[in-house]
Amino acid sequence: MFTLMIVVFILGYAIIALEHPLKLNKSATALFLAVAMWVLFVIGGEQILVNAASFQEYLLKNPGGSFLDWLSHHALLEHLGEISEILFFLLGAMTIVELVDSHEGFRIITDKIKTTNKVKLLWVISIITFFLSAVLDNLTTSIVMVALLRKLVSDKKERWFYAGMVIIAANSGGAFSPIGDVTTIMLWIGGHVTTVNIIVKTFIPSVLSMVVPLSLLSMTMKGSIQRVPQATSDHTKDPTTPFERNLVFYLGVGSLLFVPIFKTITHLPPYIGILLGLSVLWIVTEIMHKSKNDEYRSKRTIAGVLHRVDITSVLFFLGILLAVAALQSVGHLDLLAKSLDQHVGNLYVINVIIGLLSSVVDNVPLVAGAMGMYQNTFVPDHYFWEMLAYCAGTGGSILIIGSAAGVAVMGMEKIDFIWYLKKISLWALIGYFAGSIAYWAMSEFIFHA
């Protein structure tokens, strides 16, 4: 059963990758895969557990408990709680973005981007994404930037190239910031890295992981884009006022920017901060539009825009993370981490491999496994932790479902997995190795690790 779980996961992953040729929605496959993995876990029982310490600890606290009690009421609920934090954050951020979009708020930025040159626009979008993701996080930034792209690039396939670069830039920008990615947040909160040190040590590698693929991709693009018309028939018939547009835009972006500040002040998880922003926007727009007709309100209040939020991408996220959680609970990922330690040994190479693996499975359990393995081995700000932050953060760009940013963009733009693999993955891989080599060189010859 232990081996069968791996086989089923690989098979499910392949079906997700071949979504378009098979004409089978990836969210349906991911949900089925999640259920199948946990059912196999139940059938396998405690005998397939690599490390039964958590189960034994549960039995000590609950003498009358059983394996099924532990699995259902402890292991599964613990993972579901962690996944729900990400899902509610994603749902809140997507709703805020849709609300800003319904008020034409992104025109404040798109009106300032005048260029129609494909290459210039690619650089502008990528640089904005890179620095914005360090302040917000890569997930929120990718959602915001895709919403902006929809206002700038009319052709769907052309927009996919820009969206692909948004994924790379968002993950690169999030890797050098302690609040830019879930994995760096984990390392930061765990005391393994400090704010100034992680920025100083990983900024240049992160820049290279974006600039290298950006430069290569720029060589394949020529000509000008066709801009999206600023005024549609809907907006002409029922336009928002400049006051409404500015208020909702700045309040929406401010709500997203406030999340890391809220977390620092209250120490509550980010999804609480995003729900605060969502509730404030909900109240403000309800008051602002209370005298308007029902048709207007249905398009420009939270209740009205909720139906535009892509719930299928949220369900896909739920399925894929639950499936990976089953592998983590049984111990597959721990075995993988220990195997790397025994057969590879070199810490730089181990981190590179972890980064490559994070493009296939979620980087959160991989980093969690590495933190557990080396918890008492390396001191804070050791080069292993810093490179782990870089590799786990940027490695997810190699495949579109390797990061939260990629999953969100894939859901919003319906990007084909195979298309991304053919058109973007190679450039992302080259950038990833460029940054990894840069980190190794800096660590060995400048910082003398």
Image (cartoon, grey):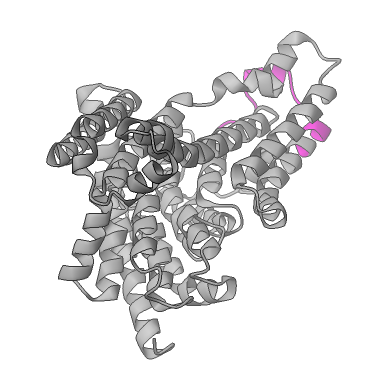
Q: Quadrant of the C terminus?
A: bottom left
How many labels, in total? 0
The residue stretch that appears in magenta: 228-246
Q: In the image, is residue 291 above or below residue 339?
A: above
Q: Quadrant of the N terminus?
A: top left
Question: Quarter of the image holding residue 140?
Answer: top right
Q: Is residue 292 left or right of residue 160?
A: right
Q: Position of residue 171 (x, y in %)?
A: 45, 55
Q: Is residue 211 left or right of residue 419?
A: right
Which residue does the image show at 33% across and 33% down from the upper left? 66
Depth check, front residue: 62 or 117:
62
Which residue does the image show at 57% across and 19% down from the upper left? 307
31 part of magenta stretch: no
236 part of magenta stretch: yes
Depth check, front residue: 152 or 132:
132
Q: Position of residue 49 (x, y in %)?
A: 23, 45
Is residue 409 among the parts visible in the rendering? no
Quick one: which residue is furthest to the right in this view? 291
Which residue does the image show at 40% across and 83% down from the upper left? 442
Q: Position of residue 17 (x, y in %)?
A: 24, 36
Depth check, front residue: 241 or 71:
71
Which residue does the image show at 40% across and 43% down from the upper left? 58
Is residue 245 among the parts visible in the rendering? yes
Q: Is residue 127 left or right of residue 276?
A: left
Question: Quarter of the image holding residue 168?
Answer: bottom left
Q: Is residue 118 left or right of residue 241?
A: left
Quick one: which residue is furthest to the top in this view? 294
Q: Position of residue 402 (x, y in %)?
A: 34, 47
